[in-house]
Image: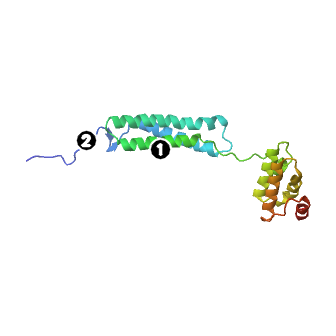
Amino acid sequence: MNAQPATTPPSSDEPSVAGVKVRPVLPLVLYALLVGSALLAFWAQRADTAPEPISRFAPWAFLAFAIGFSAYRLALVAAKRYSAFKAFSQILVAALFFMLLLLPQVVQPQQGAIAPPALLDDRDPRVRALSAELLGWRGQVAEAPKLVALLSDPDERVRAAAHGALVKLNGGADLGADVATWKERFP
């Protein structure tokens, strides 16, 4: 009779303690770097009060993780212990995430930002024209008298933008190029 042991320990290259595999230090460090850099990046992107140096450092902390992660995955692929497709897919996702972190964040206008009605008196005719157009798109009927005054502007682009904005503010009805007619409509 052959006596076989009741339980055979699983054959594995990784050490285990009480049946739980003990991971090498490098993957643990990589995952800690992943969590830390991702939290830092998200906080820097979302927080209005994040200091400028931290906002600049955050994507590069994630890049440090991505480089270490890529080297680790490629070493596993070279040792034939990990799927090449999975490794390259994960490296691609890490690279795409890094590029997303490099995109500039959208900054809300400051409290002291100049509003379009104030720009209707700017020296630059392009600024006046864009301000007039913006007022029309925003539907700011209260600013219509200022737009009527721009119908007499020396620059053709400003006159055209003011006219187009007034037409929008008038519900799409064009009253023509006569300034007096527009003054009657928007006193």
Q: Nearer the viewer, mark 1 or mark 2?
A: 1
Residue 82: x and y in percent read 34, 41
82 or 139, nearer to the observer: 139
126 or 89, nearer to the observer: 126
Q: What residue did someone put label 1 on?
A: 93
Whether residue 65 sits left or right of residue 187 in the image: it is: left
Residue 161: x and y in percent read 80, 53
**Amino acid residing under circle 2:** Ser
Q: Quadrant of the C terminus?
A: bottom right
CB contact under 8 Å: marks 1 and 2: no
Whether residue 45 sits left or right of residue 132 in the image: it is: left
Q: Residue furthest left?
A: 1
Q: Which mark is residue 11?
A: 2
Q: Which residue occupies 80% across, 65% down?
A: 173
**Amino acid residing under circle 1:** Val
| Residue 25 visible in rendering | no
